[in-house]
């Protein structure tokens, strides 16, 4: 038994014992639940996923129909959750970084307004934001007959935003392909410019070129593609608009609530990350003749990112989980359509809850892995 004196061996044995105990505990609860369900005459298993759902979903991008299976209903909820989470993360990041920088501004008015926004958001429940945007802002919009006209192609009212859809998306697909190619070209230019600067010390206007390659040219490509494409423009028929695509108010309200709420927390993270950069680094950059904009972009932000990324990852994970608040306003995300409608329809509570938990866990782990990879890839190398 002398091997037990080795600390590593003892640690492995304790971890193995803890794992066995955890598996046994889970096995006991699952078996107990299954036995009770059999006694109560409640069906168990995952066969219900292939039944016809019969559930109407007012907003979906998957082509789902009530005659489809519950598995298709689940996929629709996942897609809707991913959609609102992705656009909210992008908007919250932009707003949060902007507000965080304004919080450190020397302009008293801008700094005070940014500070008020941060403190207000961080001390108000998210549910209030969701209900405020849905009942306080979007419900005040006009009726369909009095819709806000946007260039005679889009119409905003309390039933949503009606926008045109292409009859043939070939040109838009080509424009998207061209945009991807342009981003790849910009990535190659940036790598070449960085290697050239390290080799010769000569600078290259990477940001200016990137603005043209990744900004102007893609916009021109989509404009040309849009001009060559025929569109299904919404038209008022009766009491509502027909044709095109309707961005439902539930999506807009949830997107606005998640992005503005999370942005307040991201702004505080950005402020703390920037203030963690030593003043001597900034003074040295000024001594080299760098302007304020280049100091922030080349000196402050790169050193602040290792401090910013871990807590900002937590905010991204919170946003994904907070998308479940869409159930409060009937936005068809996972909780609303699966843990709500599908659970009531089938009664398979344990299976549905387990699937929902597994989906949220998978999404959270995927985001964490990506952010950890990004953090490791861009970590500053120090001596």
Image (spheres, helix red, strand yellow):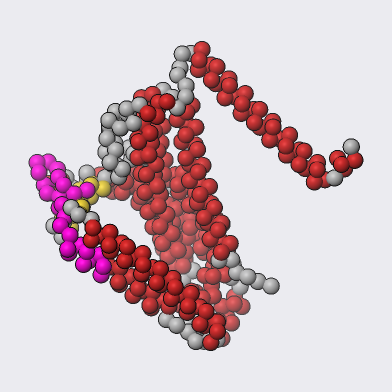
Is residue 242 shown in magenta?
A: yes
Q: Left of 46 or right of it: where is 20?
A: right
Q: Residue at x 21, y 67 (%)?
A: 224
Q: Is residue 357 above or below residue 138?
A: above
Estimate the x, y position of residue 345 in percent, counting from the top left: 36, 24
Question: What span is colored magenta in the figure?
Answer: 220-245
Q: Is residue 136 visible?
A: no
Q: Residue furthest left?
A: 238
Estimate the x, y position of residue 381 in percent, counting from the top left: 63, 70
Estimate the x, y position of residue 24 in percent, counting from the top left: 66, 27
Q: Residue at x 38, y 74 (%)?
A: 210
Residue situated in front as seen by the camera: 284 or 110: 284
Q: Quadrant of residue 60?
A: top left
Is residue 212 shown in magenta?
A: no
Q: Left of 79 or right of it: where is 40?
A: right
The C terminus is located in which quarter? bottom right
Estimate the x, y position of residue 311 in percent, counting from the top left: 55, 56
């Amino acid at each position: 038994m002398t091997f037990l004196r080795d600390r590593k061996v003892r640690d492995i044995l304790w971890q193995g014992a803890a794992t066995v105990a955890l598996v046994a505990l889970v096995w006991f609860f699952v078996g107990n639940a299954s036995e009770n369900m059999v006694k109560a005459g409640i069906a168990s298993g995952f066969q219900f996923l292939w039944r016809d759902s019969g559930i109407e979903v007012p907003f979906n991008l998957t082509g789902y129909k009530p005659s489809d299976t519950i598995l298709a209903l689940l996929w629709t909820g996942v897609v809707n959750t991913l959609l609102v989470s992705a656009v909210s993360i992008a908007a919250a990041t932009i707003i949060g970084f902007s507000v965080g920088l304004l919080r450190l501004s020397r302009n008293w008015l801008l700094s005070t307004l940014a500070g008020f926004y941060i403190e207000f958001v961080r001390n108000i429940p998210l549910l209030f934001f969701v209900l405020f945007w849905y009942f306080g802002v979007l419900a005040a919009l006009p009726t369909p007959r009095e819709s806000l006209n946007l260039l005679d192609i889009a119409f905003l009212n309390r039933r949503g935003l009606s926008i045109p859809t292409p009859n043939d998306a070939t040109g838009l697909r080509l424009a998207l392909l061209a945009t991807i190619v342009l981003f790849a070209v910009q990535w190659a230019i940036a790598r070449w410019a960085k290697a050239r600067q390290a080799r010769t010390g000569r600078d290259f206007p990477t940001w200016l070129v990137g603005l043209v390659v990744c900004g102007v040219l893609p916009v021109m490509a989509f404009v040309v593609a849009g001009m060559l494409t025929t569109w299904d423009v919404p038209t008022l028929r009766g009491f509502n608009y027909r044709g095109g695509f309707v961005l439902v108010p539930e999506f807009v309200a949830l997107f606005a609530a998640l992005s503005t709420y999370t942005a307040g927390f991201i702004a505080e993270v950005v402020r703390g990350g920037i203030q963690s950069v030593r003043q001597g680094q900034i003074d040295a950059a000024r001594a080299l003749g760098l302007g304020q904009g280049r100091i922030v972009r080349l000196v402050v932000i790169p050193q602040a990112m290792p401090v910013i990324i871990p807590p900002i990852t937590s905010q991204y994970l919170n946003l994904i989980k907070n998308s479940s608040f869409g159930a409060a306003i009937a936005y068809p995300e996972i909780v609303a359509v699966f843990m709500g409608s599908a659970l009531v329809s089938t009664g398979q509570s344990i299976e549905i809850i387990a699937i929902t938990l597994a989906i949220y866990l998978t999404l959270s782990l995927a985001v964490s892995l990506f952010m950890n990879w990004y953090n490791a890839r861009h970590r500053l190398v120090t001596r």
